[in-house]
Image (cartoon, rainbow, N blue to C red):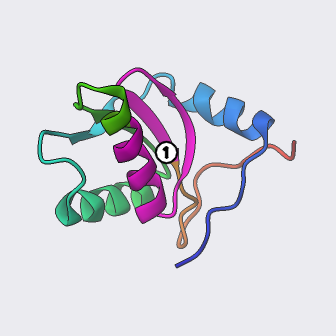
């Protein structure tokens, strides 16, 4: 597994701007973070690089743990989160789409 490259604050800000109009394409339900969900998220990240994930956990600790697990298990960087929605970024190995600013 490749560790995600740490993003600078400027890069995170840029990615949050790009993610603003995106719809959440992955939803974490009552079952939490399952292998099938991780596989689906991995595919979405490879295809889109920047993905919004909606997490349906009611309490904050569970939500934080699930978001952390999603990022860690898919080698993605957590770009930002607001409430139940997290934005994850992972550069595509095959065909990178997003050009990050150089700080």
What residue is rendered at 55% in x and 66% in y? Answer: 95
Camera-nearest residue between 73 and 94: 73
Q: Secondary structure at mark 1?
A: strand
Figure quadrant of residue 57? top left
What residue is rendered at 22% in x and 66% in y? Answer: 35
What residue is rendered at 34% in x and 29% in y? Answer: 23
What residue is rendered at 23% in x and 25% in y? Answer: 58
Q: Would residue 101 be found to the left or right of residue 90 on screen?
A: right
Residue tagged 1: 88
Percent x, y of residue 13: 70, 29
Q: Would residue 84 be found to the left or right of residue 78 on screen?
A: left
Percent x, y of residue 80: 56, 32
Percent x, y of residue 85: 38, 28
Figure quadrant of residue 61? top left
Q: Quadrant of the C terminus?
A: top right
Residue furthest to the right:
103
Camera-nearest residue between 82 and 22: 82
* Number of numbered callouts drawn: 1
Q: Would residue 28 be found to the left or right of residue 20 on screen?
A: left
Pointer 1: residues within 10 angstroms few (<14), some, or many (20+)?
A: many
In this rendering, the answer to whether 100 lies above or below 59 is below
Magenta segment: 64-88
Percent x, y of residue 60: 36, 27
Residue 33 lies in the magenta-colored region? no
Figure quadrant of residue 11? top right
Residue furthest to the bottom:
1
In this rendering, the answer to whether 9 lies above or below 89 is above
Q: Would residue 29 be found to the left or right of residue 102 on screen?
A: left
């Amino acid at each position: 597994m490749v560790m995600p490259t740490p993003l600078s604050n400027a890069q995170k800000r840029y990615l949050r701007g790009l993610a603003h109009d995106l719809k959440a394409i992955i939803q974490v339900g009552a079952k939490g973070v399952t292998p099938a969900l991780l596989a689906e998220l991995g595919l979405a990240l490879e295809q889109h690089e920047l993905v919004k994930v909606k997490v349906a956990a009611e309490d904050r600790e569970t939500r934080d743990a699930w978001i952390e697990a999603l990022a860690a298990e898919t080698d993605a960087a957590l770009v930002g989160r607001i409430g139940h929605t997290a934005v994850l970024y992972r550069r595509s190995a095959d065909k990178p789409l997003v050009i990050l600013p150089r700080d």
